Every structure is written in C-alpha cells, then in structure tokens.
Image: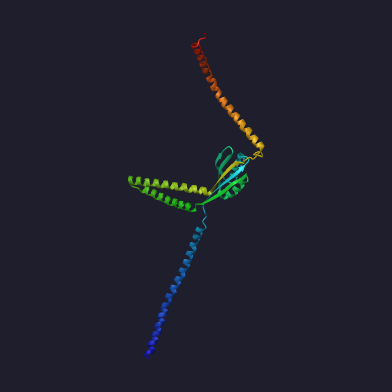
Amino acid sequence: MVRLRWSFLVVVAAGLLAGCSSPTSTESGSSASELAPQRSADFKAEQPTANNTADQQREVIRTAELDLEVDDVAGASAEVRRRTEAAGGHLEQENSYRTSTTLTLRIPAAELDRALSDLSALGRVTSRSQQAQDVTDQLVDTRSRIDSQRASVQRLRELMNRAQSVTEIVSIESELTTRESELESLQRREAAMANQVELATLTVRLDTEPTTSDEDTGFLAGLTTGWRALTEAGATILTATGAILPFAAALSVPATALYVLHRRKKALKNPTP
C-alpha cells in the first residue's frame, strides 16, 4: 500500500513538472518564429543594396582618332564641323596647314560610334582607333571625399560662429581656408572627369590624297625631270647675277678711278723720250 502511494505521488509530480515546462517551450518556439521573419526581412532589405552596387553604371572616358585622305581639305573640314554639331557635339580645337587639318572634337559618348561611321564616309580611312578608360572608382572616391570635405567645412563654420577669442577665430579661419581650397580642388577634379565621361574626345586628321602620274618613270619622266633641273639651275644663276650686279656697279667707279691714277703715276715715272 505504501509503495502504491509513493508511485502515485511520483506520477503526479511528473505530470505537474511536464505541465510547467510546456509553456516555456511554447514561448521559446514563439520567440524563434518571430525572429525568423525579422531576419528574413532584414536579409531581403539588404539585397537591393548589393544588387545596386553590382549594377552600378560604369563611368568610362572614351577617346578616338580618325585619319582620312580627302580631295578638298577645307571642304571636308567644314563638313566635319557640321556633322559634329548635328551629333550634339562641338569643335574644341583646329590646326590647319597647307595640305592638312587636325580637328579635336567633343561628342556625346553615346554618339561616338555613330559619329565615327558618319565621318569615315568623308574620305579614305587610313587609320582609326578607339580607347576607353574606366574611372568609376576614381569618381566614387572623389565624390566621397567631396562629401566629407563639405561636412568638415560646415563644422568649421559652426565653430567659427561660436569662437570667443581672436586667437580662436584666426586659427579656425586659417584651417577653414585650407579646407575650402581642398574642397574646390576636389570639385574641379570631379567636374573635369564627369565632363570627359559625358563627352568623348575625337581627333580627326584630314590630308589631301597623294597625286599619281603615269609619267613618273620612263623617257618622258626623265626628260621632264632634266628640264625642270635645267630651268631651276638657270633661275639660280640669274638670281645670283642679279644679286651681284648692284655691288659690281657700286665698285666699278672707285676701281676705274684707281686704275686711271695708277696709269698716270706710271706715265710720270717713265716719261716718253
């Protein structure tokens, strides 16, 4: 009988313990289930940022060179300028010589390939090349430094407004001037790179086509060459003679006087018997 009582008490105690532990397990499971959706939401919220970084548009500086042989350099040059303006670009520099012209053009980067094909139709292409430089990291770094420098300048201006002594004002003003100068330098650098990314640089060289003749060789070519050499030699001799004649005329007067004087002295020394 005593054993049965103890057995009954043990069973009841076990049941009570099981009942007390059940809510704890339920609460633990509930907390875990609440955290899981939160972590999943956080992960989903972070994913777009990673995708944006991966899909970030690259910043590329594009340059190109195009060499053409044309019949009329002046006419082709005018047409290059016209087509450049039609593509939304502009002429940055032009150097003209007797038989050639070099034009430096700035064209929207998106229109560079089309502009190259369009301008290539103006003559015979002797050379064509393109280069690309990715400056994405440089621009991102420069823009980040601009933001930091701008915040630093703002803090210094706030300190300037709260300065109490002349010494503090002078010290803060000196540092503020330095920071503002660095900020302007970074802004100029960023603007220059952004401009190069937006507008590609295209260098076009125009040269006249070399003229060819059927008489470059053979008897007629030799005769022509000899006659040209003879006329050039005659022209050289005549030029030299024309250059010497004024000096000869100027020297002839004193030379004649000296000759006459010499003859008189000789006649006095040797009188005629």
Q: How is the image coloured?
A: rainbow
Q: Is residue 231 above or below residue 67?
A: above
Looking at the picture, how far across and down is residue 13, in whole percent? Answer: 39, 83
Looking at the picture, how far across and down is residue 111, in whole percent? Answer: 58, 49
- Count of numbered marks: 0
Q: Quadrant of residue 4?
A: bottom left
* Residue drawn at the location 51% of the way across and 58% of the way down: 54
Q: Is residue 205 left or right of residue 1?
A: right
* Residue drawn at the location 58% of the way across and 28% of the way down: 237
Looking at the picture, how far across and down is residue 166, in whole percent? Answer: 33, 45
Q: Is residue 5 above or below residue 173?
A: below
Q: Nearer the viewer, residue 17 or 116?
A: 116
Q: Nearer the viewer, residue 251 or 119?
A: 251
Q: Quadrant of residue 91?
A: top right
* Residue drawn at the location 60% of the way across and 29% of the way down: 235
Regarding residue 111, the answer to whether it shows in the image is no
Q: Is residue 184 left or right of residue 216?
A: left
- Outermost bottom residue: 1
**Quadrant in which the N terminus is drawn:** bottom left
Q: Is residue 153 above or below residue 21?
A: above
Regarding residue 152, the answer to whether it shows in the image is yes
Q: Quadrant of residue 230?
A: top right
Q: Nearer the viewer, residue 81 or 246?
A: 246
